[in-house]
Image (cartoon, grey):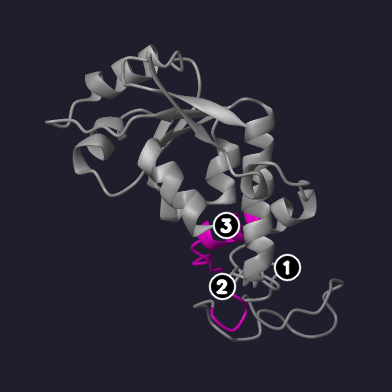
């Protein structure tokens, strides 16, 4: 598949780039995508949740009533989970949600996600560009010129560009990533992938 390279005004430049079939035209593996996305989301969890159990609640340990003769159930102390303010049974504890996904599975998942985007014609290539100053208005203008103003856009650049990043930061439907940081979740979370020409060439060369 060949794509026209556009400039930041949305006009054709007369040059084309070819998408590598081994990356953008494979047989997609949905289970690999599931595992990779699941791991990505698991890594976003802080895992700092904590509830106090019976041994951690700060209450008296005295027996609150006699064992027999009250007509009710036995009660050892006020920290029992059956009482309001008592400890929680098997409450959450701090933990790490990360789990292992093999490198080849992650690569397969990323290529599968890119294949879906290519089939949906949701990949755009633009000339490399930069902004002189950080300005959200410039980034909005870029989206409008590419006719992506109503879509969630992921811009993949060749190298860190502070002005471009800061220009997009206030837009909830736009994100900027370096090609080496591209992952399955971000690919699927965007409606359209916009590669700069050099970023696409380096990404295809690296994979």
2 vs 1, front mark: 2
Q: Which residue is mark 2?
A: 96
Q: Which residues are drawn in magenta? A: 36-56
137 magenta-colored: no
Residue at 57% across, 29% down: 2
Q: CA distance from mark 2 to mark 1?
A: 29 Å
Neighbor class of circle 3 (other Cα within 10 Å; few <14, some 14-19, many 20+) is: some
Q: Position of residue 174 (x, y in %)?
A: 41, 31
User: Of helix, strand and loop, which one carries label 3?
Assistant: helix
Quadrant position of residue 140: top left
The label on residue 178 is: none
Q: Residue at x 58, y 86 (%)?
A: 61
133 to the left or right of 120: left
Q: In the rendered structure, are the residues bearing label 2 and label 1 in contact, judged by CB atoms less than 8 Å apart?
A: no
* Quadrant of the image containing the N terminus: top right
Q: Is residue 30 above or below residue 68?
A: above
Question: Is 196 above or below relative to 183?
Answer: above
Q: Earlier in the sequence, mark 3 or mark 2?
A: 3
Q: Mark 3 — residue?
A: 40
10 Å neighbourhood of mark 2: few (<14), some, or many (≥20)?
A: few
Whichever of labels 1 and 3 marks the residue nearer the N terminus, that label is: 3
Residue 8 place in picture, x, y as percent = 31, 21
Mark 1, residue position: 82
For the residue labelled by badge 1, is the local secondary structure a helix, a strand or a loop? loop
The answer to whether residue 182 of the structure is visible from this angle is no
């Amino acid at each position: 598949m060949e794509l026209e390279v556009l400039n930041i005004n949305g006009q054709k430049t007369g040059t084309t780039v070819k998408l590598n079939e081994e990356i953008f035209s494979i047989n997609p593996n949905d289970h690999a995508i599931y595992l990779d996305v699941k791991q990505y989301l698991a890594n976003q969890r802080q895992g700092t949740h904590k509830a106090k159990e019976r041994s951690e609640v700060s209450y008296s340990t005295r027996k609150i009533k006699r064992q027999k003769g009250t007509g009710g159930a036995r009660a050892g102390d006020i920290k029992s989970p059956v009482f309001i303010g008592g400890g929680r049974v098997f409450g959450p504890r701090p933990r790490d949600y990360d789990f292992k996904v093999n490198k080849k599975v992650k690569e397969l998942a990323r290529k599968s996600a890119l294949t879906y985007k290519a089939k949906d014609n949701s990949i755009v290539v633009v000339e490399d560009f930069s902004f002189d100053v950080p300005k959200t208005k410039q980034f909005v203008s870029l989206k409008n010129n590419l006719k992506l103003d109503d879509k969630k856009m992921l811009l993949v650049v060749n190298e860190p560009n502070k002005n471009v990043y800061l220009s997009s930061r206030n837009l909830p439907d736009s994100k900027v990533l370096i090609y080496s940081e591209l992952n399955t979740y971000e690919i699927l979370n965007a409606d359209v992938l916009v590669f700069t020409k050099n970023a696409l060439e380096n990404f295809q060369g690296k994979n």
